[in-house]
Every structure is written in structure tokens, then in C-alpha cells.
Image (cartoon, rainbow, N blue to C red):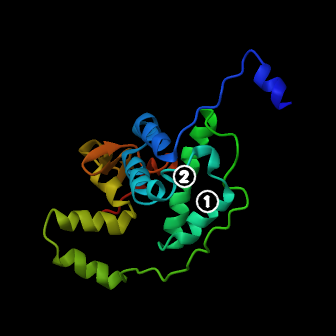
Amino acid sequence: LRLSRINSLTYRARPTSTFEQFATKWEASVLDQLKPSTAQNYRVHIRKHLKPFFGSCQMKDIHPELVQQFVASRTASPKTVRNICVTLQSMWRSARAWGYVSHDPFDGIVMPTPRHTQRFFFSVEDVQKIIAAAEEPHRTFYGLLAETGLRVGELCGLTVDDIDLERGMLVVRQSSWRGKLGSPKTSSSVRVIDLSPQ
């Protein structure tokens, strides 16, 4: 079977590359297509975690045992380790599509168990004190956050056209990240939110 595939007129030798070489190509070709915040997270994962561990490895030699060793060697939180592996999986989908690899290095990988942490919330009284103590424009900003539950980036992305005071509503159409406007986090994040009279 392998010989017949090689003898085929459409056969193309699989390209070879170290992980570091592939990562450089992938960043240049793919990351500009993603949301800036996602691209920035991927860059950090690649620079701080993936290149130092896998950098000199040939792509074809990255198998489940090595990926499991990588997972076991991380000292970050379970959620961060999972997020780093999401970055690696995204890179791997491209590597398969581009013909660098044909195998799945995530087969049978055991991921760290997520930790259940106590979430912190302000009480209603705390929120009222924060808003009362704030000066404009922060008072309006904090008040809208408390009332609507918007993400900070969504609130920073609002324009005058997104707010209809007569009908008491605002429309989330975009989000701001590091001063740049873009689409909200998910497609369901585009929504209309009712505002109270105050």
C-alpha cells in the first residue's frame, strides 16, 4: 500500500520541518486571520511554552508520549495547560492540512483535572458604594457594567449609535481590545440589552 502511494503520479514527498520552523511559518500565515486577542494568546503560548519544549523536534517525531511529557512538565494551572494544548491542536490541524504530518499526537493524552476555585463577587451594597464613590465618566462606566453584565471590552466598544435612551436599550455590535475595535467574543455576543430608566 505504501509503495503504491509513493509510485502514484500525484505523490508528493512529505515536507520536513522542526517544530520551531513550522511555528514560525504558522504564525506568519495563520495568526493574522484570528482575532487580535486570540492571536496574542497563541503567540505567548508558542513563545513561552511550545517552542522551548518542542522547538528542535521534527514534526513527524511529535507523538502522544512526548505530548504527555509536555503536559506533565507544566507548572501552570490546569486551565492554562489546557489552553496551551488548544494552541498546539490548532497548529496541528494546519500541519496535517499542509502535509507535514498525518498522525494525531493527542490520541490518549490525559489532561490535568480542572481545579474548582471560589469565584469572587461584589455584593449589591459593594457595587452601590463603588458607583457612588466614582467620578464621571467612571461612574457611568461602572454603573453600566453592573446593570448589563457586559464584558469590559464590549462596553469600551460601544458608540453613541449603539445606545437608544428613548427605547431604553443598547446594542452590542463590537468589542475593543488594546484600543482596537473588532467583533465580540462569540457570534451570540452580538445582542440587544434593556436599560433601566435610571
Which residue is the site of mark 1?
67
Residue 188 in picture, x, y percent from top left: 51, 49
Q: Residues within 10 Å of mark 2 (few under 14, many from 20)?
A: some
Residue 27 or 8: which is nearer the viewer?
Answer: 8
Q: Quadrant of the C terminus?
A: bottom left
How many labels, in total? 2
Q: Amino acid at mark 2?
A: Leu
Residue 29 in picture, x, y percent from top left: 44, 34
Dot 1 or dot 2: first in sequence order is 1
- Indicate left or right for 120 with 165 as reference: right
Tell which residue pokes out farthest to the right in this image.
Answer: 1
Q: Which mark is residue 183?
A: none
Residue 41 or 162: which is nearer the viewer?
Answer: 41
Q: Residues within 10 Å of mark 1 (few under 14, many from 20)?
A: many
> At x 30% / y 78%, what residue is drawn?
127
- Indicate left or right for 159 with 168 as reference: left
Occupied quadrant, residue 59: top right
* SS category of the residue bearing label 2: helix
Residue 32 or 186: which is nearer the viewer?
Answer: 32
> At x 17% / y 78%, what residue is drawn?
133
Q: Is there a contact, CB below 8 Å, between mark 1 and mark 2?
A: yes
> At x 49% / y 40%, what residue is drawn?
22
Which residue is the site of mark 2?
88
Q: CA distance from mark 1 to mark 2?
A: 10 Å
